[in-house]
Amino acid sequence: MSALPESIKALQVLPDLKGVQVVTIPWASQEKVQNLADNEIIIRVRAVGLNPTDWKHAMSQLGRPGAISGCDAAGDVVKVGAAVKHLKVGDRAAGFTYGGSWQKDNGAFAEYARFAGAVCFKLPDDMTYEEASSFPIPHLTAVRALYMRLGLPKPDTKAANEKILIWGGSTAVGHHTIQLAKLSGLTVFVTASPGAHEELKALGADHCFDYKDTDVVSKITSADGGADIIYGVDAVTEKDTTDLIVDAMSKTRGGTIITTLPISNETKNRRADVSVEFMLVYTELGYELTVANAAVIAALKEGGKSQDVPKVLSGWIAVVAALKEDEERTLEYVLQDMPKVLSGWKAGQGAPKFKTQRLRKMQGGLDNIGEGLKIMAEGNYGREKLVYTIA
């Protein structure tokens, strides 16, 4: 292993929570770097992918001033903890960390970063760093929703032979959930704007619906012989999207819905025969996390932009318990299933069984990531993933 640099450039959340700035932070001298945890790895970052959580933590009260920004990255493994067996120094890998929240010494938007090994996968030989950086959070969110919470069969095992409704097929999470659900044998119902329908059908969607259609629920429940859908994933979770999914669940068997943002008690209790669960992908990291003030999360859930969110950060009170089972099951998926899902990957084309989102390759590296965060905050992007080459 080559010597680690004494200092690195990283993107830091500004004191006023109105963006990010490039700073220099110590690296090789950090105790967490010198004495790397057994289950962690260090990656020399080559490319990063942007997620909605990144702008929310950099430009709203969800974030913490001084924290290092960024969750998803891909690069070269330069150090490996003693318990990590699926990766070694020199491998190309991608993974996620929880940037912008509590870590002031580590984040994906940096020249080097630490990652929990369980959420890191080895890149197929022909996968580019930019393609890989688009995967970790959206892909592993879909994995957690489908296989850890809904209990569905993994790809290419026993077919599920059930129906699932995915709200927000054009989102990053929707893009990955559609493909995995199809590989698991589900009949896939998807909502999205009409212009995306053909593209989503090519990914595996069986039935597509316009999310703006005032009759969307009745059209879903009358499709495919009366629908009878018992699974749902809300990749949007804004305004009344989850309520609409609840209403679309089977009238005789009920259903189970996973959401990607918090939901109200009214939504949880909308139907006694439908279970609605909010989940965070960060539990796959395997340690206890402190997320932003619950009132702030609720404000953002209602669709508020950063400038609309009340300054109610009175304490970091939303604590997510350590779920070692999630960490173990994620590692199992990364080891056993992901290589099969990505088998045959060709740069620019994807794999026979799986495609990446359309990539929007941004210019300027770390110095310009702030621009990408603003683009996302303003909603000026479509069915694409913003990625930056770092080195």
Image (spheres, rainbow, N blue to C red):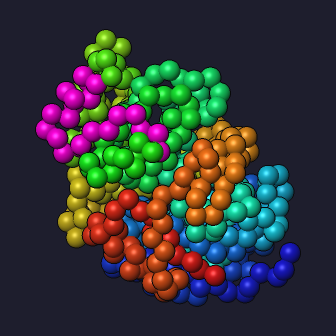
Up-down: is 297 above or below 379?
above
Q: Where is residue 4 in the image (x, y as percent from the top left)?
A: 77, 81
Apparent side of residue 126 relative to residue 387 in the rendered image (left or right) = right
Magenta region includes residue 351: no
Q: What residue is rendered at 45% in x and 70% in y? A: 360
Up-down: is 104 above or below 300?
below
Q: What residue is rendered at 53% in x and 56% in y? A: 356
Nearer-the-camera pick, 250 or 287 = 250
Residue pushed farthest top? 252
Up-down: is 322 above or below 371?
above
Say if residue 118 shows up in the picture: no
Q: Where is residue 156 in the image (x, y as percent from the top left)?
A: 64, 31
Say if residue 190 shows up in the picture: yes
Q: Position of residue 12 (x, y in %)?
A: 48, 79
Nearer-the-camera pick, 16 or 270 = 270
Nearer-the-camera pick, 384 or 34 = 384
Q: In which quarter of the image is the N terminus?
A: bottom right
The residues colored magenta run: 203-223
Apparent side of residue 45 relative to residue 317 in the rendered image (left or right) = right
Q: Quadrant of the C terminus?
A: bottom right
Q: What residue is rendered at 79% in x and 57% in y? A: 87
Magenta region includes residue 219: yes
Apparent side of residue 335 relative to residue 146 in the rendered image (left or right) = right
